[in-house]
Image (cartoon, grey):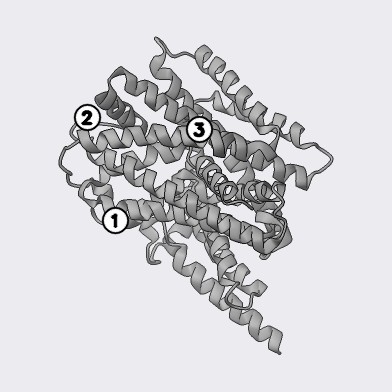
Amino acid sequence: MKKKDILFTGLMLFALFFGAGNLIFPPFLGMEAGRSFWPAIIGFVLTGVSLPILSVVAISFAKGGVASIGSRVHPLFGLIFAIIVYLAIGPFFGIPRGASVAYEMGAQPFLTTASKGSLFIFMAIFFLIVYLLSLNPSKLVDRIGQWLTPALLLSIAALCVAAFFKLDAPLTDPTSKYAESPFITGFIEGYLTMDTIAALAFGIVVITAFADRGITDRASQIKATITAGVIAGIGLATVYISIGWIGTKMTTKGDYDNGGALLTDAAYLLFGDGGQVLLGTIVALACLTTCIGLTSACAQYFHERWSAISYKNFVRLLIVISFVIANLGLTQIINISGPVLIMIYPFAIVLVLLSFITLLVPANKGLYVGAVAMTAIFSLNDGLTAFELKIEVLHQAISWVPFFSSGLGWLLPAIVGGTVGWLVSYLGDRT
């Protein structure tokens, strides 16, 4: 494969990741973290960059994709987990959220009055574009990597460079949220980007892109995927740190409830009325590329699983479902998706890390079953608590575990469960 093809694939991967959450969460983190910005953004980058790139690489190692990784626990678990992941990042949450952010930040500021009618019309146009650009997955690198990503990067660079020279407010004290454990708080905030679970789907897009360019050898695909992942990772980390830094400089400019409002004001301060046009361009391109990638990835998976239904028909079905949910509005989508992501994310992280661990040590089923079983206890509790359906007995029984209050209570139990499970399987095989 030519170096430029790997470069464009890396740029495509960057654009697929850089969507709604990636744009609005880092600035808000910067505003709240203040002087604790660096440990907070490092934590955010770990879940927002490192884990997603590792997930893409893990999928390149697994011949059957995300279902294959989950099947190491049990085939039924692998199937159910894959379906939940694709539905969550696709038509239920990921795609509608991207479209909703595009409307609220890219279109609504230019409307005299926002209404259900204007939302409906915008969504109809937005999803028509997504539909047309998703019909042929082999063209994604050309359409996104060569054209949309450079335009997106240039727009972001203009905003960040202007902010570096014009915004000079001093850093403020961190809010209570970031005062004690800024790194862990930033790590948890990285969940909201949905990129680690999205990466489980984007892996198939990258492999397809390389296969379409004649790279069918597994070793060559893995090497090319790692290189493309590094390119995407460098781009994501640079952008997150840059727009997060803008947030640290906006704390004295107003009281903001979300990163979208903060960025809107920053763009206006830097460029006047033209700033809204610039930000609208960034938002539209970021959300559009991510929605195209998610639609294509979901349609490819479901078509491979149920081949009787064509890829194009799955695209149509996904577009219709996403369109209906997107018309509910951004707030409603975020309120529902947050608790679901809290439940799914630990599973994704554990399975990805196990994929790399098993490259170094002999794998057995006990390792996966033990780690996932312990993770399930804490993920279920955290998700139900977020839904305000807390099971008090369960909550009290596990609340003593280290990092529980930070949302990382599953970490040590997963390590212990995996170790015990591996030992039990290993000793059982020897007897």
Per the rendering, the mark at residue 287 is 3
Mark 1 falls on what kind of element?
A: helix
Q: Amino acid at mark 2?
A: Gly
Q: Residues within 10 Å of mark 1 (few under 14, many from 20)?
A: some
Residue at figure coordinates x 32%, y 39% from the top left: 28
Residue at figure coordinates x 43%, y 30% from the top left: 282
Q: How many marks?
A: 3
From the top left corner, tell me how far across and down residue 83 is, in percent: 67, 47
Q: CA distance from mark 1 to mark 3?
A: 28 Å
Q: CA distance from mark 1 to mark 2?
A: 24 Å
Horizontal arrangement in the rendering, residue 6 relative to residue 303 (left or right): left
Q: Residues within 10 Å of mark 3 (few under 14, many from 20)?
A: many
Asked whether 222 or 371 is in front, the reply is 222
Instruction: State which mark lies toward you, 2 or 3.
Output: 3
The image shows residue 5, relative to residue 312, as above or below, that is below
Per the rendering, the mark at residue 39 is 1
Q: Amino acid at mark 3?
A: Cys
The answer to which image quadrant residue 59 occupies is bottom right
- Point out the image quarter for the C terminus: bottom right
Q: CA distance from mark 2 to mark 3?
A: 26 Å
Asked whether 388 or 60 is in front, the reply is 60
Marks 2,3: beta carbons within 8 A: no
Mark 2 falls on what kind of element?
A: loop
Per the rendering, the mark at residue 254 is 2
Marks 1,3: beta carbons within 8 A: no
From the top left corner, tell me how far across and down residue 167 is, in percent: 20, 35
Horizontal arrangement in the rendering, residue 161 relative to residue 329 (left or right): left
Q: Residue furthest top?
A: 112
From the top left corner, tell me how far across and down residue 302 is, in percent: 73, 43
Asked whether 367 or 397 is in front, the reply is 367
Residue at figure coordinates x 66%, y 26% from the top left: 132
| N-terminal-most mark, 1 or 3 | 1
